[in-house]
Image (spheres, coloured by chain):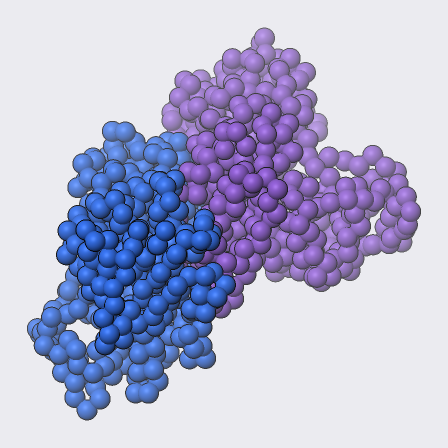
Chain colours: A purple, B blue
Amino acid sequence: MKFVIIGGDAAGMSAASKAKRVDKYVDVVVLEKTFDVSYSACGMPYNIADPDRLIDDLIVRTPEVFREEQGIDLRLGHEVLRIDPKEKMIEGRLNDRDDFQIKYDKLLIATGARARKLTIPGHDAPGVLVLRSLQDGRRLKSYIEEHEVRSALIIGSGYIGLEMAEALHDRDIKVFLTDIRTELAPWMPHEMANLIKEELESKGAELLLGKEICELRSVDGSIEVIFRDSELKVDLVLVGVGVEPCSELASEAGLELGPYRSIAVDEYLHTSNPDIFAAGDCSDAFHAITGVRVWIPLALRANRAGWAAGENIFSDSVLLPGVLGTSVFKVMDYEVARTGFSLGEAAIAGFDPVEELIRSRSKAHGHPNNQFVYVHLVADRNSRRLLGANIVGKEGAAHRIDALAVALHTGMTVDAFFNCDLAYAPPFSPVWDPMLTAARQLQKKIAFPEKKPTFEDEKNLLLL
Amino acid sequence: MKFVIIGGDAAGMSAASKAKRVDKYVDVVVLEKTFDVSYSACGMPYNIADPDRLIDDLIVRTPEVFREEQGIDLRLGHEVLRIDPKEKMIEGRLNDRDDFQIKYDKLLIATGARARKLTIPGHDAPGVLVLRSLQDGRRLKSYIEEHEVRSALIIGSGYIGLEMAEALHDRDIKVFLTDIRTELAPWMPHEMANLIKEELESKGAELLLGKEICELRSVDGSIEVIFRDSELKVDLVLVGVGVEPCSELASEAGLELGPYRSIAVDEYLHTSNPDIFAAGDCSDAFHAITGVRVWIPLALRANRAGWAAGENIFSDSVLLPGVLGTSVFKVMDYEVARTGFSLGEAAIAGFDPVEELIRSRSKAHGHPNNQFVYVHLVADRNSRRLLGANIVGKEGAAHRIDALAVALHTGMTVDAFFNCDLAYAPPFSPVWDPMLTAARQLQKKIAFPEKKPTFEDEKNLLLL
């Protein structure tokens, strides 16, 4: 069998490795249009923050290892231009020069997502950069160093924008962050999102929210940023306005598309063509709560879907149930984590959502270095099922969210969650973990809708 | 209604506060034999570690607050000696002098647990101390200071013993730790327990395992410890050989007892007498996996049971489903967490348990300050249900365990857990969280029983 994979990033290489482990005699060909495979893309902001590390430190496994130790026919510089599902063949171009054709028995599309581009004048001026591929990372890091960047404007307040605000701040670069939206992290309650805003500002970042950019002008190595109502001059502009799925090959081959023009796949990663699979950021998934198709490009799902596809090309043995969009990122000293639906998303999904936000502590009463922990829960008023959660804090937010993710996967009610036997020791939480306090307050909120949000303190926890 | 509570610690005061909030006209009398209520007992090792903090900093709420702000009739120095269920009356002694009698409509026994005592000669010699009550904490902390303690022997390697090893080490006291058992943390696989042993030894603690003590002798302000085969001289002996429930009052009143002579209660905290409740470390609980009665005295359950009893004296409205014994403690730089059954406990409970231990990382490949994280899972071979977990590591062990606790509460299989959408960002975990890696390796172990434990590295995670 010949298994051809388009794209050599997380999903593609996971699939290739898995297929070879299932059957070492299968012929696995990976076509990667760049010259980088198997790197930690999510690690780029942290690498860029550190002048002493090479961006190539993020490479997890070299092409040689895939080729020599795993027997994968990994071809770099191979851009695929067309899929012919009838002939079971793909066509492409090598190093922008030579055409190539390859027949396949099973095909995996793992083309990922690309950074969305601005469309304003000057969007491609020198010093206007994006961060998506390792090559983008190289370009950005060397630009910072070669141009002695002292100030930067980040356009967009998604994960990348916020993580890069920290990274650039760590490089002693004055950070401006702008978004056309008036609110950071709009999936959270205002009080919670405001923590992130205050944290950024306290570290010297300047936020320009609700502002529209009209033009970027490259002038003498600087960039003039023309807002509708003001101007700004910086050494670097980083555009982080989201990503879009690389689904054109699939679309042109007549495959069905899902939300946001991602490639529609079933629970076994089949596209609408029985011999073509898709996995990773180019493809969609089912939401674990509603079963509805969603496009939430995140690293774990990409690795998992690739891994599953590498098994399922032989026979449909790995079913992937669904995603919650569980994620976490770090902004300066804050951990910001979420899983499941926001209040708005829950309402759109047809629930009658009720939310509660509480403030508790990262450690027991009286324990040194106690930090605030904020927990926001969303549940359905009628079924009492938990639908989503946000946790923000200077410690213990990142890992706590997984307990709520597991709860969401099992359809747990807020009542069942409140009854969970969670861990306690003074260095790690109050006796009632902040998640339990939040669950309790949400129970009360469901019973008494007029109830105000409670910022609980350890002293008040007997008031549960 | 007159609600009388015996014991003013976590369970008792939670019940008193709750009952008053449900109905401010209910007459709540709390009889506490000591002069301390509402303190963070679990915080004592950390407080003792810090010479600049007073032990009384651990008091969360003073008697005055309970009396004046909450209207609770809190009586200190009141030791209860007898319960007369027929007359619905209790008898006791005030300040070791005066007898008292009180009638009740509903009674809560929240007498807690006491430190188990050694029975060897010299067990009560000066300088041989325990740590259970706040008064014990005062005594221990002032003993350390007044006697300029430079060396200490801890007898027993339970939570208290291990936490106090850290606390005494922080006070520059040479720590010896002995146990009649040959292994620390015997609920874990040997390789995992060994991490704790090595950590203690690397910090200068001396472990004397598998040793039996014959006698303690107080000589000139020091204590001579006579082992069967050797001797040791230290300035202080701390006995931490476990606790036992204070259930004599209940037993003498004819109430049914549960495991380890704890007081048997149903899911509403009723004892076998309809007007008498029990909550906290003196009482038992149902195990969330098997429904079997267990006695696992831990702080969250004590608070929760008190809280529930304070509601249920009016009508049975709060049902507590069961416990997992989820717990965490800190030993020097290690976080040590567990939930559910060990391999041995699972076998005793009638399962056909299979276990897996993996080593992964606390952060993504290439991220600075990456630490090892060890995850041990136990599942039932036939049903594939997760039964227990241990996590040990220098960061991210404490909060991760809660995700597994939630999974255990819902009866999740290892397969469903492996499919959970958990959070990922480079500062917090590898793409595949160590818990997911462990679940995957356990799946393989079930399929291929001869499989060796895998110490996975981020580099190998594509090998999932």
Examine the rendered structure and indicate whether residue B263 appears above or below residue B129. above
Residue A424 appears in which quarter of the rendering?
Answer: bottom left
Count of number-bearing discs: 0
Q: Where is residue B298 in the image (x, y as percent from the top left)?
A: 32, 55
Whether residue A30 is visible here, answered yes or no, is: no
The residue that appears at 26% across and 50% down in the rendered structure is: B276
Residue B53 appears in which quarter of the rendering?
Answer: bottom left
Examine the rendered structure and indicate whether residue A84 appears above or below residue B443. above
Whether residue A342 is visible here, answered yes or no, is: yes
In this view of the protein, which residue sits in the foreground, B301 or A260? B301
Q: Where is residue A63 in the image (x, y as percent from the top left)?
A: 52, 38
In this view of the protein, which residue sits in the foreground, A388 or B436? A388
Q: Position of residue B431 (x, y in %)?
A: 50, 42
Residue B409 is left or right of residue B187, and the answer is right
Q: Residue furthest top?
A: A86
Residue A316 is left or right of residue B155, and the answer is right
Residue A220 is left or right of residue A411, and the answer is right
The residue that appears at 23% across and 70% down in the rendered structure is: B99
The residue that appears at 44% across and 17% down in the rendered structure is: A1
The residue that appears at 28% across and 61% down in the rendered structure is: B102
Examine the rendered structure and indicate whether residue A123 appears above or below residue A149. above
Residue B434 appears in which quarter of the rendering?
Answer: top left
In this view of the protein, which residue sits in the foreground, B390 or B117? B117
